[in-house]
Amino acid sequence: MKTNSESSAGITNRQLLLSLLSKSDSESVKQAWESLDVAPEYSLLKRPEVGMVMVKAKAGGNGTNFNMGEMTVTRTVLQLSGHQVGYGYIAGRDKEKSLTVALIDALYQLYEWQSAIEEKIMKPLERALQNAQNKHKQRVDRTKVNFFTMVRGE
Amino acid sequence: MYVAVKGGEKAIDEAHQFLAEKRRGETRIEALSAEQISQQLGLGVDRVMTEGSLYDRELAALALKQAMGDSVEAIFLLRAYRTTLPRFGTSTPIETDAMRVERRISATYKDVPGGQALGPTFDYTHRLLDFALLAEGESKLTHHDSSTQSVESKLADNAESSVNDEAYQRVSNFLRQEALLKEQFKLSGKAVDITREPLKYPCPRDGRLQTLARADEGFLIALAYSTQRGYGRTHPFAGEIRMGYVEVNLFIEELGFDLCLGEICVTECDMINQFAGNEQEPPQFTSGYGVSFGFCERKTMAMALVDRSLQAEELGEVVDTPAAQAEFVLSHCDNVEASGFVSHLKLPHYVDFQSELALVRKMREEFFDSKEREGQVTSNDTDLENSLTEQTGASRA
């Protein structure tokens, strides 16, 4: 069994996977997971738990860092029988989604699951997110204005 | 001093029951779901998240429902809830430059790179009540179907967006490139966290911004307005306002890299203010910053104005207006603290008041005794009091 080496490229793909999963809604994540049709054995290192993360911002968008307020986050950390550790940190309070994300993350570290996860999970989720974002951008762009300055007085 | 009372359990239970009935309203009217509140009263939800200092649309909607629409009560509920949760960590700073923009305007540059996108705004509406919404129907504007858009307007749109289809560059950077904007005082080290340690004065900017971010919108607007009317010399321009979605990333120690937790909606405002300069520095612009969860545009504008006012001391300006006095502003801007202290006055103060009553009676007795000794007292207290009032009035005049 060959595990995904933590090369910089590997990290990027794993980060991309986790980013796609966290941004997709629970239903899409659930469907994506079911499409793999697998039930691996695992043990929980951190049971699904709701907590918070303090969100940092930068003054003026680029200055001094400050704490702007917290957001709810659910996290799960689990380990497959082959010792791959999966992380499910997601915005909001959704233990089921968090557990599923952790499972997918752990499985993605197994070579034999990588292409299936990329094909059945990453590609469709990325497409769906891209579509939604394009639609959103088009809606926003229709409100773009050109203001004309009127000449004052004569 | 507050002395505890006991008893009244039955009445209190009944009052809570009554409140629940009142909250529900008439049962022939359908109950509102938290989802409906989140979707259709979204700006109320955004305010509760911002001032409750917890980003969670569903919980903020629930809080509003439970509080019968009372924002301050809902904010209190959310603040109380957040104390029950563990904190997993602190995010890397959000990158608002990379925001997936839903609205972006500038009041300082007409042709700003990236263009101006009005987004879903109340601006330019006529503020006329839309009676179509009252008739349980939908406003004719509710569903905008792009397929029904005229060809001309589509062409015009395409033309416009192709012209403006560049990244939304930060407006303040244009001034910065020309060295016309005073560099921000960048604090080093760990940011102050007012949820973990009390504010200390003088308060650094990170602590001020955190306090202002959760501050009461009404209080900040009043202060901001005071700076515009003359209790301040800030000459502001809304350099840029943007609202949209940003990623939140958390560094996981064991992994050695950042995880994306998802996207949140935020609004930010960069105010640009005139600064006359001083002996060391040439005239230039300074800036104030406002940011909120969700779409709280008015709040972010007010916050930016107050943030700028509170920089007075650092800029060597005279601190002689209410909005520039950090201790006054920061210690009174939190509506959970403020409403708590104001509201506590309605709790039973019977013992406290009894002692006060005894004291006033005693003082009056002494007062009249001394008057009597001086032979000035009339038989009628009221007459005396009236004449005293007149005397004071006269002496004042």
Image: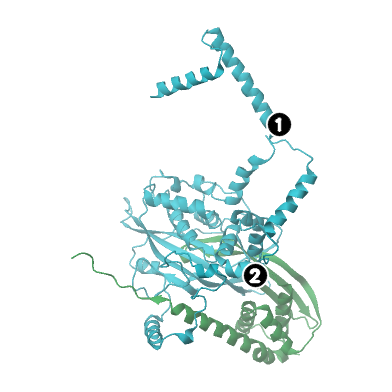
Indicate the quadrant where residue A96 lies. bottom right
Task: In the displayed orientation, state which residue is furthest to the left.
Answer: A154
Decide which of B123, A108 is in the foreground and name it. Answer: B123
Which SS class for mark 1?
A: helix
Residue B20 left/right relative to B90 = right
* Chain ID, green in image: A
In this orientation, which residue lies closer to the viewer: B138 or B144? Answer: B138
Question: Callout 1 environment at 10 Å: few (<14), some (14 to 19), or many (20+)?
Answer: some
Percent x, y of residue B230: 36, 48
Residue for badge 1:
B351
Tag 2: Cα neighbours inside 10 Å, few (<14), some, or many (≥20)? some
Question: In screen coordinates, is B340 left or right of B207?
Answer: right
Q: Comparing marks 1 and 2, which lies closer to the viewer?
A: 2
Regarding residue B114, the answer to whether it shows in the image is no
Q: What is the secondary structure assignment of the residue under circle 2?
A: helix
Name the residue carrying label 2.
B35
Is any atom of residue B281 visible in this view?
yes
